[in-house]
Image (tube, rainbow, N blue to C red):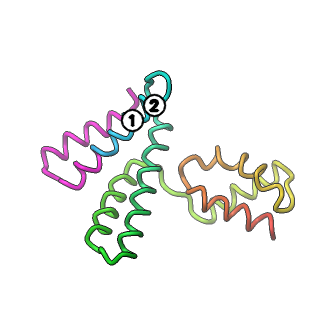
């Protein structure tokens, strides 16, 4: 079993004992999402830590989008609940890249690929994505690449 999944299970037990309802429901939801991903496809498999990080990133994004939707609908209480869950999930994710770090990685990828002009965006994205791996949202990466290639 992966170290991250072990940590999630241990934290689930700890949150049950401390009666922390937000942590409890968030970790249960995260483990359920991981289990669904493990049995998806033709054969059940054990997820690696990187794959679990991808699942948790997707769940955190769902919480962020739901909080925004609730906020726009004037449902502040539900929006706050979603933000609380997102905060718990982010404890298990790698630290996000700063704009400077992301810009440096994009510059390196542009130099590696020798890309020029907006038509080379896919080529640069292919080079940057493995380096970023869960530390920056795809939209943010695409915006940085677009800005660099159009400059």
Callout 1: helix, strand or loop? Answer: helix
* 7 in magenta: yes
Q: What residue is shown at x 81% (from left), y 62% (from top)?
A: 118
Left or right: where 6 falls relative to 147: left
* 46 in magenta: no
Callout 2: helix, strand or loop? Answer: loop
The quarter of the rendered structure image containing the C terminus is bottom right
* Residue 99 percent coordinates (x, y): 61, 65
Q: Closer to the camera, 145 or 72? A: 72
Q: Which residue is mark 1?
A: 36
Is 151 placed above or below 8 here? below
Taken as a whole, is the magenta stretch helix, strand or loop? helix
The quarter of the rendered structure image containing the N terminus is top left
Where are the magenta residues, as a range? 1-27
Left or right: where 142 falls relative to 112: left
> How far apart in space, not on screen, are marks 2 and 1 (Cα)?
6 Å
Q: Are marks 2 and 1 in contact (CB under 8 Å)?
A: yes
* Residue 23 percent coordinates (x, y): 24, 52
Left or right: where 6 falls relative to 25: right
* Residue 47 percent coordinates (x, y): 45, 30
Q: Which residue is mark 2?
A: 40
Is 103 placed above or below 58 here? below
């Amino acid at each position: 079993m992966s170290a991250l999944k072990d940590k999630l299970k241990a934290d689930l037990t700890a949150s049950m004992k401390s009666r922390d309802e937000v942590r409890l429901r968030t970790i249960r939801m995260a483990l359920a999402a991981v289990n669904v991903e493990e049995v998806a496809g033709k054969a059940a498999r054990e997820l690696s830590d990187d794959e679990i990080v991808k699942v948790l990133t997707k769940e955190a994004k769902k919480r962020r989008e739901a909080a925004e939707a609730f906020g726009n609908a004037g449902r502040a209480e539900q929006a706050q609940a979603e933000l609380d869950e997102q905060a718990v999930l982010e404890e298990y994710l790698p630290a996000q890249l700063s704009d400077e770090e992301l810009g440096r990685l994009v510059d390196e990828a542009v130099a590696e690929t020798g890309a020029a002009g907006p038509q080379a965006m896919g080529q640069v994205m292919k080079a940057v994505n493995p380096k970023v791996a869960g530390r920056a949202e795809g939209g943010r990466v695409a915006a940085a690449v677009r800005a660099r290639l159009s400059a």
